[in-house]
Amino acid sequence: MPMNAADRTDGEMYYEQLVPGQVYNSGSIAVTADEIKSFAARYDPQPFHLDSAAAEKSIFGGLVASGWLTASLTMRLMVKSEFKFGTGVIGLGVDSLRWPKPVRPGDTLSATVEIAGMRASESKPGFGVVKIRTTTSNQLGDVVQVMVSSVLVRRRLA
Amino acid sequence: MPMNAADRTDGEMYYEQLVPGQVYNSGSIAVTADEIKSFAARYDPQPFHLDSAAAEKSIFGGLVASGWLTASLTMRLMVKSEFKFGTGVIGLGVDSLRWPKPVRPGDTLSATVEIAGMRASESKPGFGVVKIRTTTSNQLGDVVQVMVSSVLVRRRLA
């Protein structure tokens, strides 16, 4: 019997490989004041993201990253994690996104992706809908972002 | 009686000015292939965000923006909208974020911010918690992102 395209084992993540509770790790990434400011200039031009002096007078007491920069850096960590977003995991949407602590210049971030739930897709028979909880932490272990989202993962036996 | 600091009328948004159902509009912003690719190279390095040829073979049928670029551009639209995020509106978190249609090169995005709910803050007496629904649309009126989030807005009478 010939191999089906869905039988490829080139590193793509399959629904059947996943187990609720399983945790995947990412690498890490350093956050600089330059990136915080340049991201803010384009996407979130508020004083506490743009200017160190203005930020010191704000409720944050110093320069902090836009939550959208934290989310975007987390996406980079996710794409390059063991969870293999790069091979066909498609985001469906976010159910919750929180930033318990701000990200500051000099922080180094890493993330874990936990399988929080799984179900077959009703509309797309060849896919499963996987709920994941992605937790982003700084070098001290402080949690800077928690996101619950759903992704579409291909089933091996479509 | 002397003016209280909280009585300033320098354009800052106050909780008491808001009414559920009220809608605030943003300006607009154009999305280029260059921005889609450069954002992806740093934050979401997947083929359908990075490379037009690879994207044509993907389920999107062409280059599409990262959802995090759409969210970040929406933040820019929000900061510069009538809702005056720039004067002290602080994001608490996101309860739902969906991307019903992809953003493509050449699209022009604009957003509306609707007051979806309001309550006094229990932990911060001088503030109210305002639930907002932000809808981002392209030049054809197609909705490309819907976000429900909560923001902290200062009360006039603290």
Image (cartoon, coloured by chain):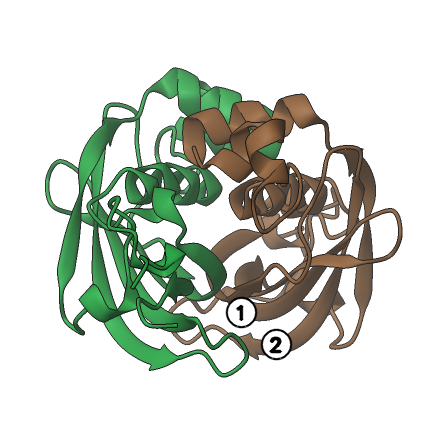
Chain colours: A green, B brown
Q: Amino acid at mark 2?
A: Met
Query: Residue at the front extreme?
Result: A1
Q: Residue A1's spot in the image, x, y percent?
A: 29, 64
* Badge 1: chain ID: B
- On whether disc 1 and disc 2 are found on a single subunit, the reply is yes
Label of residue A13 in the image: none
Label of residue B118 in the image: 2
Query: Residue at the left extreme?
Result: A140
- Label 1 crowd (10 A; few <14 / some 14-19 / many >=20): many
Q: CA distance from mark 1 to mark 2?
A: 6 Å
In the picture provided, is A28 more to the left or to the right than A149?
A: left
- Label 2 crowd (10 A; few <14 / some 14-19 / many >=20): some
In this rendered view, identify the residue nearer to me: A62 or B28. Answer: B28
In the picture provided, is B141 more to the left or to the right than A26?
A: right
Where, by quadrant of the figure, is residue A10 drawn?
Answer: top left
Q: Residue B65's spot in the image, x, y percent?
A: 61, 40
Q: Residue A13's spot in the image, x, y percent?
A: 28, 55
Measuring 59% from the left and 37% from the top, which residue is drawn there? Answer: B55
Q: Is residue B109 above or below residue A146?
A: above
Label of residue B129 in the image: 1
Measuring 69% from the left and 48% from the top, which residue is drawn there? Answer: B12
Asked whether the viewer can see residue A44, the reply is no
Measuring 68% from the left and 26% from the top, which residue is drawn there? Answer: B33
Q: Are marks 1 and 2 in contact (CB under 8 Å)?
A: yes
In this rendered view, identify the residue nearer to me: A133 or A4. Answer: A4
Dot 2 falls on a residue whose secondary structure is: strand
In the picture provided, is B107 more to the left or to the right than A7?
A: right
